[in-house]
Image (cartoon, grey):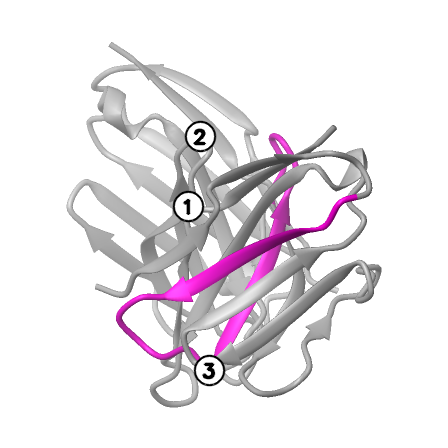
Amino acid sequence: KQEVTQIPAALSVPEGENLVLNCSFTDSAIYNLQWFRQDPGKGLTSLLLIQSSQREQTSGRLNASLDKSSGRSTLYIAASQPGDSATYLCAVRPTAAGNKLTFGGGTRVLVKP
Amino acid sequence: GAVVSQHPSWVICKSGTSVKIECRSLDFQATTMFWYRQFPKQSLMLMATSNEGSKATYEQGVEKDKFLINHASLTLSTLTVTSAHPEDSSFYICSARVFQRVGTDTQYFGPGTRLTVL
């Protein structure tokens, strides 16, 4: 059974500092991995999706890397801003035909002005 | 972009009553919708997968008679929490799957519904 872990569970940084969020998964046989953002009391917004054949994806200040063999992904957020404060979730998809996503517990981020 | 809505956004009900939550894909047809449950400061747990025109597939440990799912059209799925109790209080999130071809489909998430059972 796939298990996804995110460490740390919470993170507080001053504005301008780079953020590094970690996601690990126990079964390396994944199809893709996705990072989401969730604001308090809201749904999920997809940030980046990395296919299993890819090593990284970038979007603006966000960069996500994937090391499938070691079961790890890292989300980097450069030059953090107070608006980046949210919970960040990673989720893995097992196969191309598989619908189900397995989510990590999330990392709650607070960027202090 | 693809938009998924949920209604209501929050609901408070008395113990023993039933509550219906709607999930709609506004600008696309979704052959599959998913229902998740999220407890405070915890991650999303998949409850069931709903396919249009067929019975939902429930995850292990989820009571199908407690959480009734109906996917009557390609744009609407409903979750009914029957005889709700305080332990059913949670944040319920749906997602809708846009199928293009195997491996390229994407799930779009709704804004969630907060259920509080008194």
Residue named by callout 3: B31
Residue sitting nearer the eye, B3 or A51: B3
Chain for disc number 3: B
Q: Does the residue at mark 2 contact the one at mark 3 (Cβ under 8 Å)?
A: no
Q: Does the residue at mark 1 contact the one at mark 2 (Cβ under 8 Å)?
A: no
Q: Which residues are magenta?
A: B17-43
Instruction: State the SS at label 1.
Output: strand
- Distance between mark 3 and mark 1 Cα atoms: 32 Å
Outermost residue on the top side: it is: A113
Q: Which picture quadrant has residue A7?
A: top right
Residue named by callout 2: A40
Chain for disc number 1: A
Disc 3 marks which amino acid?
Thr
Q: Is disc 3 in the same subunit as disc 1?
A: no
Residue sitting nearer the eye, A16 or B52: B52
In the image, taking residue B28 as reference, residue A90 lies left or right, namely: right
Instruction: Give the number of the mark in front: 2 or 3.
Output: 3
Residue named by callout 1: A74
Instruction: Give the number of the mark in front: 3 or 1.
Output: 3
Task: Identify the residue at image location x=63%, y=49%.
Answer: B37
